[in-house]
Amino acid sequence: MSENNSFLVFSGTSTRYLAEKICASLNCPLGNLVVTRFSDGEFAVSYEESIRGRDVFLVQSTFPNSDNLMELLLMIDAAKRASARNIIAVVPYFGWARQDRKDKPRVSIGAKLVADLLSVAGIDRLITMDLHADQIQGFFDVPVDHLYASGVILPYLQGLHLKDMVIASPDVGGSKRANTYAKYLGCPLVLCNKTRARANVVSSMQIIGDVKDKNVVIIDDMVDTAGTITMAADIMKEAGALSVRACASHCVMSGPASERVQNSALEEMIFTDSIPYANRSAKVKQLSVADMFAETIRRVVDNESISSQYLV
C-alpha cells in the first residue's frame, strides 16, 4: 500500500465508532478533527493537523438528525479551504435516499438535493453502500464507489448451514436485490406483495411463493419502523415456515422498531454497522463493514479496481 502519509481518515461525531475500526484495519491513526458546539445548536469543525496536498477520507453516515449531514458538509468545506488534494466522502448510510423521485405532485427529491449539497461543498468522490435506489449514483457528477453489504451478509448466511433455505423480499421493489442473493445461494425466491395506507404503515400483505417447512431469510436494504419486516415474518410463520430471519444493510430502527422485532416471529435480525444501534433488542445482530470500507479506501489510494470485492 502507498505510504500512510499520502492520505488521512477523519470522522464525524456520530460515525466515529466505525471510523476507528476502519483505521484499525488500515493500520493508520484516525485524524484529529474537533467539532465545537455553541449554545444555540450551531457548530463548527476544524482540522487540528495539516491536510495540505493529502487525500482526505471523511467518514460520516447521514442518518437523521440533519446535524450529521451538516457536519459532513462543514468537514468537506473546511478540507477544501485547507488545500486537501482530494476529498472523498465515505458515507456508509446515505440518508434521504428514499426520496429518489417524484412519486406524487409537488414533492421534493431529497436524494438529488443531498447529492447537490455534497458536490457543491466540494467532494471529489463518494464511497457509499447499498443506496435505496441504484440510480442515485447518477445524481452525482463525481465518481461513486457503490459497495454492497452482501459482502458480509452472504458469508454469514452460508455459515448458518440452513437446510431448505428460501430467500424472500418484503416488497416487489426489493425483488432484484433478493434475487441476487437467491441466485448466489442457489435457493428459491419468495415475494411479499404489500399495500401501504401511508408512509411507514402497511395495510395488507400477501405471500407469493411457498414457505411451508422452509427456513426463510428476508432481504431488505433498510429497516425503519420494522412494520413491514415483522408483518412478513409473522405471516410466513403462520404459513408454515420453520424459521424466519431478516437481513438488512442499514439499521435505521426508529420508533417502535426494536419492540416490534423483539415481539415478532423473527429468529434474528441481521444488520451491518453502517448506523449505530444500542442493541435494545436481543434478536438484533450487527456485522461490521469496517474491513470492506478499509479495503476500498486502500484500493482508491493505490488506484486499484474495487469490483473484485463484490460477491454479487
Image: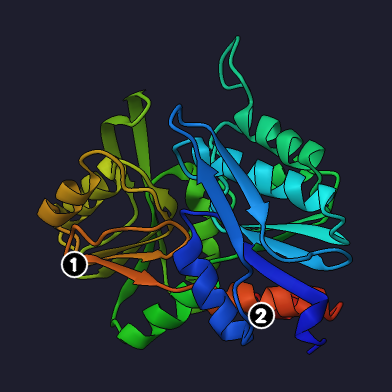
- Front of the two marks 2 and 1: 2
Residue 303 in which image quadrant = bottom right
Q: Residue at x 59, y 73 (%)?
A: 30
Q: Amino acid at mark 1?
A: Glu
**Viewer-nearest residue: 175 or 254:** 254
Q: Residue at x 15, y 48 (%)?
A: 259
Residue 126: image x %, image y %? 73, 55
* Disc 2: which residue: 295
**Viewer-nearest residue: 288 or 123:** 123
Whether residue 251 is situated above or below residue 67 in the rendered picture:
below
Mark 2 or 1, nearer chain start: 1
**Viewer-nearest residue: 279 or 78:** 78
Residue 198: image x %, image y %? 35, 22
Q: Mark 2 to mark 1: distance in Å?
A: 32 Å
Q: Residues within 10 Å of mark 2 (few under 14, many from 20)?
A: some
**Viewer-nearest residue: 21 or 91:** 21
- Pointers 2 and 1 in contact (CB under 8 A)? no
- Quarter in which the N terminus is drawn: bottom right
Residue 267: image tag? 1
- Quarter in which the C terminus is drawn: bottom right
Q: Residues within 10 Å of mark 1 (few under 14, many from 20)?
A: some
Left/right of residue 287 with respect to residue 237 in the rendered view: right
Left/right of residue 59 with respect to residue 305 in the rendered view: left
Residue 246: image tag? none
**In this rendering, does residue 13 appear at all?**
yes
Q: Residue at x 43, y 65 (%)?
A: 273
Left/right of residue 309 with respect to residue 39 in the rendered view: right
Q: Amino acid at mark 2?
A: Glu
Total numbered labels placed on residues in the image: 2
Q: Residue at x 29, y 59 (%)?
A: 210
The secondary structure type at the circle numbered 2 is: helix
